[in-house]
Amino acid sequence: MNFSEVFKQSNQLCKVSPDGKYLATCVQYRLVVRDFNSLQIVHLYTCLDPVMHMEWSSDSLFILCAMYKRGLVQVWSLEQPDWHCKIDEGSIGLVSSRWSPDGRHILNTTEFNLRVTVWSLCTKAVSYIKYPKACQKGVDFTADGRYMALAERRECKDYISVFVCDDWHLLRHFESETQDLAGLEWSPNCCVLAVWDNCLEYKILLYSLDGRLLSSYSAYEWSLGIKSVAWSPSSQFLAVGSYDEKVRILNHITWKKITEFEHPATIINTKAVVFKEVEKRPVVGSEDLSIHQLTVDNSLFSTQSKYEITQLPAQVPVIKPDPDRANPKIGISALAFSADNRFLATKNDNMPQSLWVWDMQRLSLLAVLEQTAPVRCFVWDPRRPRLALCTGNTKVYLWSPAGCVSVNVPVEGSFQVQSLFWHCSGSSLVLLSKEHICLCGASVASFCLQ
């Protein structure tokens, strides 16, 4: 089992470069860039304030570090370590900063969403875009990097502007048929823009690049609506998760619902497999104890776990949400398609310990992973149909069509895995605890496929 040593990080700021060669982490004021294979430090930069956001440029040549409290953005170059750029938004403040797809422009959103400022690193030119809307996902770029869609709010109405990223001229501007737009997202093939309303109204709209309304879908009225949206990588399916604990799948031809996936408390589907995590604390005899093991070896006392297949029908643990609180813990909060479009993973908030995997070829439930603790994060391998997840303990879990596996993170001390993500090649996993990171090699990640 191939685990690296542990490195420090802060604010969960850890990113792999798009070309997969480097690993960047932030530790308060410092930006540390390592070679991904050797984990040797290749660059070390010092920022003017603790970093709140960090992002690679698309060509892996620059790194953006945003310091929102001071309204500052600093940009560092890997090719020319002595070169750097500082952008100061001044008294107008800063709440968001990101790269454009070409890696040569930076988009800063000011406080109170007064405007978006586009800064050019090449010409030092500055462009301003007014009326950006403060919402869940108000900006999105097409996969080819040619166009940007921006949600706007003017005169108590929602609008969408489509810009050409080459020179930032306005291509289309049209009113959105939403009451209170919550988010927008381009399809992976760059042809369709999905726009959805806030949770008080179930409405999702599909627009073409030129602003034509292709279709509108609403599953029900007078109840909490859409909670999550995800495109399949092929753009053939649009999955819509809602507060009624269902996922509805829309097709790309008619934009009508072809099926819906329910998340029942009792699983009776005979074709589905329910994997239940079972913990077992190892029995330690007195002859196994030594001063070295007591002070260094944490694995001696760590709880082991494995998956057992549960007989059907199976009960799924359910938490009743508090109706008196805002944003109730109910409904589908997370959706993710596998890279080959074969599988869809979902999480229902009032069943926080369970992860559901659906077969998109048969349009049916394939597997349910029932954990001993709430699922914090799950992510698909970008190359193969395998899923990694964590629950805030010292283990990482992997699922593939072949089965499930639970792996302890064998590091000194207690490494509570809070989140994780794959290397772009699918060869490694990056594990993040509250203040540290650890790399998990392919030998572990492929274990469940053997």
Image: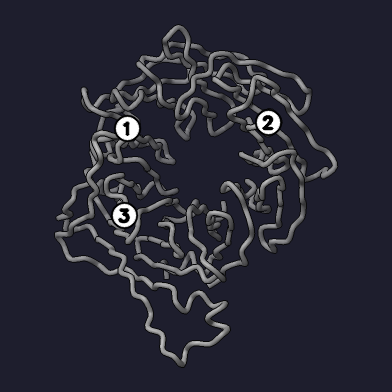
* Lower position in the chain sequence, tag 1 or tag 3: 1
Q: For residue 70, which numbered disc appears in the image?
A: 2
For mark 3, does the 10 Å Cα neighbourhood hold few (<14), some (14 to 19), or many (20 or more) residues?
many
Q: For residue 326, which numbered disc appears in the image?
A: 1
Q: Looking at the image, is 375 positioned above or below residue 81?
A: below
What residue is drawn where x is 35% and y is 37%?
Answer: 237
Q: Secondary structure at mark 3?
A: loop
- Residue 365: image location, x then y, percent: 25, 51
Query: Front-most of 442 and 418?
Result: 418
What residue is drawn where x is 70% and y is 55%?
Answer: 34
Answer with left or right where residue 415 lies relative to residue 74: left
Q: Amino acid at mark 1?
A: Ala
For mark 1, does the 10 Å Cα neighbourhood hold few (<14), some (14 to 19), or many (20 or more) residues?
few
Q: Which residue is mark 3?
A: 353
Answer with left or right where residue 10 lies relative to residue 242: right
Q: CA distance from mark 1 to mark 3?
A: 21 Å
Query: Front-most of 294 and 92?
Result: 294
Going by the picture, which residue comes out furthest to the right? 82
The C terminus: image quadrant? bottom left
Q: For residue 291, which numbered disc appears in the image?
A: none
- Residue 11: image location, x then y, percent: 58, 46
For mark 2, does the 10 Å Cα neighbourhood hold few (<14), some (14 to 19), or many (20 or more) residues?
some
**Mark 1 or 3, closer to the camera:** 1
Q: Looking at the image, is 155 positioned above or below residue 411?
A: above
Q: Amino acid at mark 3?
A: Gln
**Mark 2 or 3, closer to the camera:** 2
- Residue 12: image location, x then y, percent: 56, 48
Answer with left or right where residue 174 lies relative to residue 247: right
Q: Quadrant of residue 38?
A: bottom right
